[in-house]
């Protein structure tokens, strides 16, 4: 009696089922992966900027002098006409505490190149283009740095700096899905 050997290949039905399962897996994984990438970008940017704020505060205390953090798109001067911190920033010793980088008297401590095109960062508070840490590490009034991407306010991250100068990542204190700054819920501008 002869036995029949089956060809070692896929039937059309097996191929269609495999493709259908693969399409379902891709449809589930891709949106979640994109969301994870966006969350990672916001977390990284907010943690990096938190470190910049901590550096500015610690340098003010260490040097017993004013240290200013300002918006800067060119890495060599403060831009007082915009609240778009995603462009970049400067951290510098501010000998006369005027919030402006003065050649010859002030020293640049750190240059931030910005956040890229997908994340915005603005400041909520009275000082929107510069923040100054005094010699004891405190600032004049609390501020909140708000980082947003294309997903909007419900996925925003915020960094709150209280009057003592201590920065922290904001949380959703009232469980409404939005992080809370020093003046209440943050918004993406």
Image: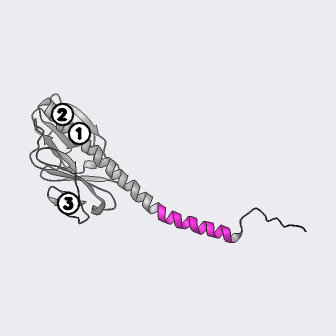
Q: Main secondary structure of the magenta part?
A: helix
Nearest the viewer among 79 and 151 is: 151
Is label 2 in contact with label 1 (beta carbons under 8 Å)? no
Residue located farthest toward the right when viewing the structure as drawn: 1
Q: What residue is pinned by disc 3?
A: 173
Instruction: Tell me, for residue 59, which label it has, or none.
Output: 2
Residue drawn at (32%, 57%), measured in percent from left and top? Answer: 149
Side (left or right) of 6 relative to 56? right
- Judge depth for marks 3 and 1 and give the one in front: 3
Residue drawn at (57%, 64%), measured in percent from left and top? Answer: 22
Mark 2: secondary structure: helix
Above or below — where is 182 with respect to 87?
below
Asked whether residue 115 appears in the rendered view, the answer is no
Is label 2 in contact with label 3 (beta carbons under 8 Å)? no
Q: CA distance from mark 2 to mark 3?
A: 31 Å
Nearest the viewer among 106 and 15 is: 15
Disc on the earlier residue, 2 or 1: 2
Q: What residue is pinned by disc 1?
A: 90
In the image, which residues are magenta? 13-29
Q: Quadrant of residue 48?
A: top left
Q: Residues within 10 Å of mark 3 (few under 14, many from 20)?
A: few
Is-magenta flag for residue 68? no
Mark 1: secondary structure: strand
Residue 98 rendering spot, x and y as whole percentages: 10, 39
Mark 3: secondary structure: loop
Residue 158 rendering spot, x and y as whole percentages: 24, 53
Q: Residues within 10 Å of mark 1 (few under 14, many from 20)?
A: many
Residue drawn at (43%, 61%), measured in percent from left and top? Answer: 32
Q: CA distance from mark 2 to mark 1?
A: 13 Å
């Amino acid at each position: 009696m002869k036995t029949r050997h089956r060809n070692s290949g896929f039937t059309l039905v097996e191929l269609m089922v495999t493709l259908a399962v693969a399409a379902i897996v891709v449809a589930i994984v891709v949106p979640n992966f994109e969301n994870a990438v966006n969350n990672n970008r916001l977390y990284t940017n907010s943690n990096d900027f938190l470190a910049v704020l901590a550096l500015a505060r610690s340098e003010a205390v260490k040097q017993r002098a004013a240290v200013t953090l300002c918006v800067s798109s060119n890495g060599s001067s403060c831009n007082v006409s915009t609240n778009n911190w995603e462009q970049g920033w400067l951290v510098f010793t501010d000998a006369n505490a005027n919030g402006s980088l003065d050649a010859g008297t002030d020293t640049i401590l750190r240059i931030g190149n910005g956040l890229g095109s997908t994340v915005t960062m603005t400041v909520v508070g009275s000082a929107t283009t510069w923040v100054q840490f005094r010699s004891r590490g405190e600032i004049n009034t609390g501020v909140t740095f708000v980082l947003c991407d294309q997903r909007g306010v419900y996925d925003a991250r915020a960094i709150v700096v209280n009057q003592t100068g201590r920065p922290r990542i904001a949380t959703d204190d009232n469980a409404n899905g939005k992080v809370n700054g020093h003046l209440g819920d943050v918004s993406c501008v």
